[in-house]
Image (cartoon, rainbow, N blue to C red):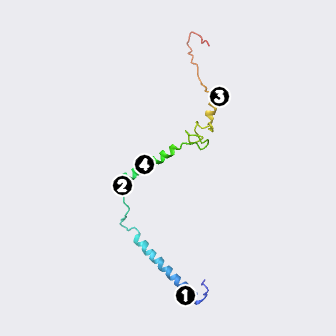
């Protein structure tokens, strides 16, 4: 369905805009075609030289060491704000909530299971 013409000046302006847009799209297509990879697979991406790899590795190690030293020095608990532990999951925290086996061990104490071994051919009866 064709568009209804408005005014001649507006129509000229619309045609001019369409032409400029078409030229921009064509120039973009030419640029894309020039930068795409050729069929011979000649890419500019290469491996880093060994010296650069070791320099990057050393920089990464020093970064990690500095961040771990900074984080370990602040060792304050987020729950009770005391030093020495970092969260309430630590048993050192006063807000520590023990897991079920630990809780049972605290309430009931340690328990031991044992079995008496009595041979059938013993001549002396077992005295308890």
* Residue corresponding to mark 3: 108
* Residue corresponding to mark 1: 12
Task: Tally the marks.
Answer: 4
Residue found at x 60% / y 89%: 7
Q: Position of residue 105 (x, y in %)?
A: 62, 30
Nearer to us of marks 4 and 1 is 4
- Specify the label residue 62 is tagged with: 4
- Specify the label residue 37 is tagged with: none
Q: In which image quadrant can residue 11 be found?
A: bottom right
Q: Position of residue 83 (x, y in %)?
A: 56, 40
Residue found at x 58% / y 90%: 8
Left or right: residue 127 versus residue 55 is right
Dot 1: element: helix
Dot 4: element: helix
| In the depicted structure, whether residue 92 falls above or below residue 63 | above
Between 53 and 87, the residue placed more toward the observer is 87
The tag earlier along the polypeptide, 2 or 3, is 2
Nearer to us of marks 2 and 3 is 2
**Distance (Cα) linking label 4 and label 1:** 65 Å
Residue found at x 48% / y 77%: 25
Dot 2: element: helix
The tag earlier along the polypeptide, 4 or 3, is 4
Q: Residues within 10 Å of mark 2 (few under 14, many from 20)?
A: few
**Distance (Cα) linking label 4 and label 3:** 49 Å
Q: Residues within 10 Å of mark 1 (few under 14, many from 20)?
A: few
Nearer to us of marks 1 and 2 is 2
The tag earlier along the polypeptide, 1 or 3, is 1
Dot 3: element: helix
The tag earlier along the polypeptide, 1 or 2, is 1
Given contact means CB atoms under 8 Å apart, are the residues at marks 4 and 3 in contact? no
């Amino acid at each position: 369905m064709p568009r209804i013409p408005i005014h001649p000046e507006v129509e000229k302006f619309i045609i001019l805009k369409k032409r400029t847009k078409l030229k921009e799209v064509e120039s973009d297509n030419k640029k894309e075609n020039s930068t795409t990879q050729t069929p011979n697979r000649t890419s500019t991406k290469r491996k880093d030289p060994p010296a650069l790899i070791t320099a990057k590795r050393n920089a990464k190690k020093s970064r990690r060491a500095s961040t771990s030293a900074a984080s370990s020095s602040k060792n304050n608990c987020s729950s009770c704000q005391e030093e020495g532990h970092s969260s309430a999951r630590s048993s050192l925290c006063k807000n520590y909530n023990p897991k079920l086996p630990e809780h049972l061990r605290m309430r009931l104490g340690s328990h031991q299971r044992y079995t008496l071994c009595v041979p059938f051919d013993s001549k002396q009866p077992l005295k308890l």
